[in-house]
Structure formats: structure tokens, C-alpha cells
């Protein structure tokens, strides 16, 4: 389970004296704790593996956006720190699908859901998220699904 991997990674980073990795893992655990509190408030218990993977992807995206902003502002040291955190977070994700694998998964999802047009896009994306959580960039997948459903 991912939760155990986070704990193990934190212990290893502490033993190795890797402050940047330790900081990133602690950040993940804090975000996960917030997510669990939110889930309990909604009466669901702990966050599922899929929710944790989605949380990790969101955190990576935030780090990438922050790094780009820091680079534009002439702060390469802060951009490097954000990129390093994104790499640590990405190390917990499963292997990412290649472009060909993503295209095949999208075609399969369209066929399995019986999607016929743009009105079915949400159904296809939901199906992909259920099957490939943490394995693909859903912003990119969304554009590909849109192109497929609009006949492109």
C-alpha cells in the first residue's frame, strides 16, 4: 500500500539524512492526512488508493506550475527545489502509460462505455480514471478523448 511506502520512505530519508526527500515525503503525508480528515467528514473513512494517486498527481502538477512561475521570475533555485519535490512525489506513482498505450486505453474506454459524442466525454474520463489512476496525465488524456469523440 502507498501509505506504508510513504512511512518507509520517510524512515529511509531520515536515516540517510536526505532533508529534501524527507521534506517532500512529510508534505505528502500532511496532504494525505488532510484528505483523510475531509473523507471522514463526508463519512467515507480513509482515502482509497485511487484518491491517493489523484492527490499525488495534483501535487506534481502544482510543483510543475510553481517551478515554471519561479523560472519566469528569475528564481532558478526555487524552481529547482519545486522540480526536486515533484520527482520525489512522482517516484510513488506507478509507471506512466506511453502515448501509444494511452491511445489504446482511450479507444478501449470509448468502446466499453459506448460513448458516441462529446456528451459522453465525462463517462469516458471517469472510466479511464477508474482503470488507470496514477498511470496517465488526465489533462493530456482529456484532449485525446475530446479529439476521438469529435471525430478527429
Image (cartoon, grey):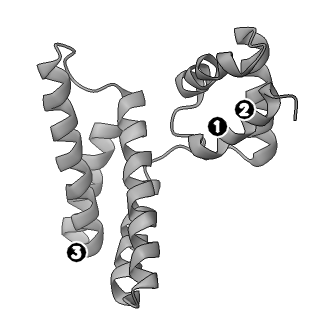
Relative to 81, is 100 on the left or the right?
right
Q: CA distance from mark 3 to mark 2?
A: 41 Å
Q: CA distance from mark 1 to mark 3?
A: 36 Å
Q: Secondary structure at mark 2?
A: helix
Residue that carries the numbered disc 1 in the rendered image: 142
Q: How many marks?
A: 3
Residue 45 in view? yes
Locate residue 120, reporting x and y percent. 66, 16
* Residue at 58% over, 40% down: 138
Closer to the chain start, of discs 3 and 2, is 3
The numbered mark at residue 19 is: 3
Q: Secondary structure at mark 1?
A: helix
Residue that carries the numbered disc 2 in the rendered image: 145
Relative to 124, is 66 on the left or the right?
left
Locate residue 118, reporting x and y percent. 71, 22
Density class for disc 1 (Cα within 10 Å; few <14, some 14-19, many ≥20) is: some
* Residue at 37% over, 52% down: 59
23 w.r.t. 127: above or below: below
Camera-nearest label, 1 or 3 = 1
141 w.r.t. 70: above or below: above
Which of 136/16 is in front? 136
Residue 137 in view? no
Amino acid at each position: 500500500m502507498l501509505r506504508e511506502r510513504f512511512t518507509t520512505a520517510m524512515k529511509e530519508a531520515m536515516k540517510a539524512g536526505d532533508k529534501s526527500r524527507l521534506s517532500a515525503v512529510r508534505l505528502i503525508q500532511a496532504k494525505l492526512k488532510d484528505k483523510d480528515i475531509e473523507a471522514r467528514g463526508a463519512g467515507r473513512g480513509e482515502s482509497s488508493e485511487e484518491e491517493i494517486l489523484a492527490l499525488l498527481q495534483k501535487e506534481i502538477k502544482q510543483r510543475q506550475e510553481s517551478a515554471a512561475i519561479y523560472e519566469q521570475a528569475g528564481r532558478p533555485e526555487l524552481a529547482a527545489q519545486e522540480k526536486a519535490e515533484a520527482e520525489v512525489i512522482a517516484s510513488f506513482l506507478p509507471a506512466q502509460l506511453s502515448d501509444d498505450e494511452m491511445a489504446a486505453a482511450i479507444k478501449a474506454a470509448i468502446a466499453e462505455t459506448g460513448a458516441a459524442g462529446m456528451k459522453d466525454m465525462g463517462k469516458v474520463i471517469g472510466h479511464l480514471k477508474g482503470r488507470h489512476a496514477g498511470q496517465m496525465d488526465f489533462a493530456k488524456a482529456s484532449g485525446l478523448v475530446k479529439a476521438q469523440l469529435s471525430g478527429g
